[in-house]
Amino acid sequence: MTLKLYVDRMSQPSRAVIIFCKLNGIDFEEIHINLSKRQQLSPEFKEINPMKQVPAIMDGRFKLFESHAILRYLACAFPGIADHWYPADLYKRAKVDSVLDWHHSNLRRGAAGYIFNTVLAPAFGLPLNPQAAAEAEKVLLASLANIESVWLQRKGRFLLGSGQPSIADLSLVCEIMELEILDEKDRERIIGPYKRVLNWIDDTKNAMEPHFQEVHVILFKAKQKFHNQRYDVESSIPQSSIKPEFHSKM
């Protein structure tokens, strides 16, 4: 039976799972779970994932959720997957696992929290939260600094000094790609100082083309949509209502 992916391409971990399947020639049926319409809360999807989150998969009668568990499963369950994605060597595999475990409580918490509270919240009927965004930004910047100084090593282009990407590279870069939704000045302010991170992002994207770009098209379209929405809101504010000291800084 064909592997079923329950995903929303606006979801960073969903994109990672889709890209992995495309890169490795894994046949799959993509089932769109629209997060903005809260389809993940439906009784039907709860049967697939009781946690009501994407991505989730069904391989025959086997159901699995949590993106890192899914990537590990796919790397092991399907034939012909290159070893560099999730090495058979116990020590190398443990190192990849260490990055994946670190990701969820650090980079993901910072990046997802910052993006949601500065851009995405209104799409889910919630207000922007500058205080939560500021706290998430601290976590995000600390995470980028750790990628720069700890996870990226001198001898290889990819995480852990590898010469080829692993599922950790794929997962982390898909997370960081969410910063594309920000306006250019904000994105540059956050990620610009981390030159090794920027080079690693480019190397990872290039190693995963053409599928990386194709799967991220939705993100680039969303960026334009959110930019237009911000412009419309700002244009609707009467100039006389803007405080002089704020106006002078524009």
Image: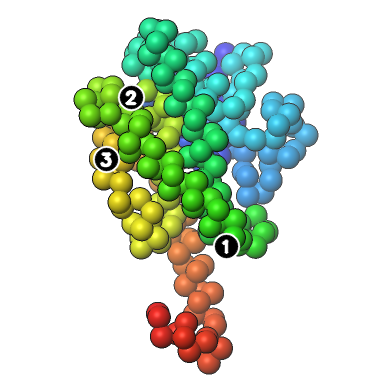
Classify mark 2: residues with Cα within 10 Å, few (<14), some (14-19) or many (20+).
many
- Find residue 146 and report its image quarter: top left
Evaluate whether residue 18 shows in this view. Answer: no
Mark 3 or 1, nearer chain start: 1
Q: Position of residue 210 (x, y in %)?
A: 31, 34
Q: Is residue 16 left or right of residue 53?
A: left
Q: CA distance from mark 3 to mark 2?
A: 13 Å
Residue 147 location (% of width, % of height): 37, 36
> Which of the 4 image quarters holds residue 6?
top right
Q: Nearer the viewer, residue 242 or 59?
A: 242
Dot 2 and dot 1 residues touching (CB under 8 Å): no
Q: Residue at x 37, y 23 (%)?
A: 166
- Name the residue type under label 3: Arg
Q: Secondary structure at mark 2?
A: loop
Camera-nearest residue between 180 and 219 = 180
Label 2 and label 1: CA atoms lie apart by 34 Å
N-term-proximal mark, 3 vs 2? 2
Question: What residue is disc 1 on?
Answer: 130
Q: In the displayed orientation, state which residue is furthest to the right.
A: 43
Label 1: state its secondary structure: helix
- Compared with 188, 50 (above or below) is above
- Mark pair 3, 1: CA separation: 29 Å
- 3 and 2 marks in contact (CB < 8 Å): no
Q: Earlier in the sequence, mark 2 or mark 1?
A: 1
Q: Quadrant of the C terminus?
A: bottom left
Instruction: Say above or below: 154 vs 36.
Output: above
Residue 1, compared with residue 113, is above or below; it is above
Q: Is label 3 in contact with label 1 (beta carbons under 8 Å)?
A: no
Q: Position of residue 58 (x, y in %)?
A: 61, 20
User: Image point 43% across, 57% down: which residue?
Assistant: 182
Reading the image, the residue beneath label 2 is 160
Q: Which residue is mark 3?
A: 196
